[in-house]
Amino acid sequence: MADGSEYRRSRRPARWPRPPEIIHVGAACRDVAPDDPRGWRLGGGVTYAALTTARLGLRTVAVVGVDALARTASELDLLREAGAELLVLDLPEGPIFHNVETPAGRVQTCLATGVPLPVPAMPESWAHAAAWSIAPVAGEVTDAWAAAIPDGAYVGLAWQGFLRTLRPGQRVTKRAPVAGRLLDRADIVGVSHHDLDPSTPLVELFPLLRPSGRLLVTQGHEGGFLVTLDADRRPAAEVRYRATRSDRELDPTGAGDVFLAALISTGVRRALAGRAYGRPDLPFAAAAGSLVVEGPGLTAVPDRAAVLVRMARERVRQLVRPTVAERIGTYDGEAGSTTTAPGGGPRRRGPRRRRAPRAG
């Protein structure tokens, strides 16, 4: 392309007869990985999200920013082999992180911050994509991208990429959320409880979101909750989901990105989970998130068949129910939290012992 970007179709011989169903945007990062011969492993929300939707069977496009080394990554071939089409944008610098997992959570050090992702020329057919997924890792997707998203598209946004303060050679710290065009454009916004202060009142976040939008808060082994707003940005419905059990946790990287991408996918194709909820399918997304932590990096991103098998295993214990959440750190079973009793009325639960984080 004239702007220096490279548009490459997947290795599948047949071209799509229709426009893409979902377009993901973000920069790939390189995570330090001593167990990898390269010394690093390709990551970033855009790569996990795009591989998820491609392996789930959606017609997927990924607009991926890469530095010189990331461009050579074999992980990009995983996306192409899954059927994703890539628009690769060359960046003079990409984000680089050193992650250390501790019992208290991830300690992340920034080695390079990366640069903003330019808005390139795009094929006309992309204007008819059903959904867009904004998945930054270092705030590189600016509000200039809002104008590139067609008015009728469903938009998901991974908020954590906007909630980090990055300085080379220093630990990553939290950044307070602020209003923005992309945030106001998003139909569903996903965030982990680790990315905001747990004491953050949800009522402070609602004015930043789109009217009638949704806020997903993932809480590891505690599950999480989904709040749907009304036209005045007030809670219209709140539901809690339970986490799906993983057989093992080898690498927690990407669990939230896979969860959100799978959830958006069920909005694009309502029968993807084998049922038509009429709303995003939280058990399906939780099953996908539980699988990706069982292997290293992008190689563990599951396909639809694996997700359905995991859902079938968990069907008895999986539960989505109404709830009341007031803070980012509102957990199921904590003192003072309100849940729904079998008969439909509210009940109070006492506190329970905290366990190690789990996917979902």
Image (spheres, grey):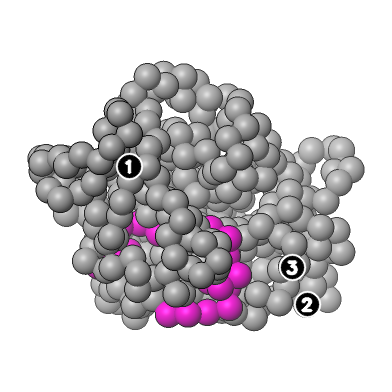
Quadrant of the image containing the C terminus: top left
Residue 100 lies left or right of residue 36; in this view the side is left
Residue 181 lies in the magenta stretch? yes
Give me the residue at 76% from left, 55% from top: 129
Question: At 61% from the left edge and 40% from the top edge, which residue is drawn?
Answer: 278
Q: In this figure, which residue is indicated by the disc labeled 2?
A: 3
> Dot 2: few (<14), some (14–19), or many (≥20) neighbours within 10 Å?
few
List the residue tagged with mark 1: 223
Is there a contact, CB below 8 Å, between mark 1 and mark 3? no
**51 with respect to 36 (left or right):** right
Can you give x and y, in whole percent of width and height, for residue 45 in the image?
A: 50, 57
The answer to whether residue 179 is visible is: yes
Report x, y in % for residue 119: 70, 76
Residue 137 versus residue 120 in the image, above or below: above
Q: Is mark 1 on a helix, strand or loop?
A: loop
Q: Percent from the top left, x then y, of residue 176?
A: 34, 77
Lower position in the chain sequence, tag 1 or tag 3: 3
Q: In this view, does 357 lie above or below 184?
A: above
First to last magenta residue range = 178-197
Structural crowding at the residue carrying mark 3, measured as other residues with C-alpha within 10 Å and reported as few (<14), some (14–19) or many (≥20)? few
Q: Are marks 1 and 2 in contact (CB under 8 Å)?
A: no
Q: Estimate how packed mark 1 is, as few (under 14), some (14 to 19) or many (20 or more) residues with alpha carbons within 10 Å.
A: many
The numbered dot on residue 151 is 3
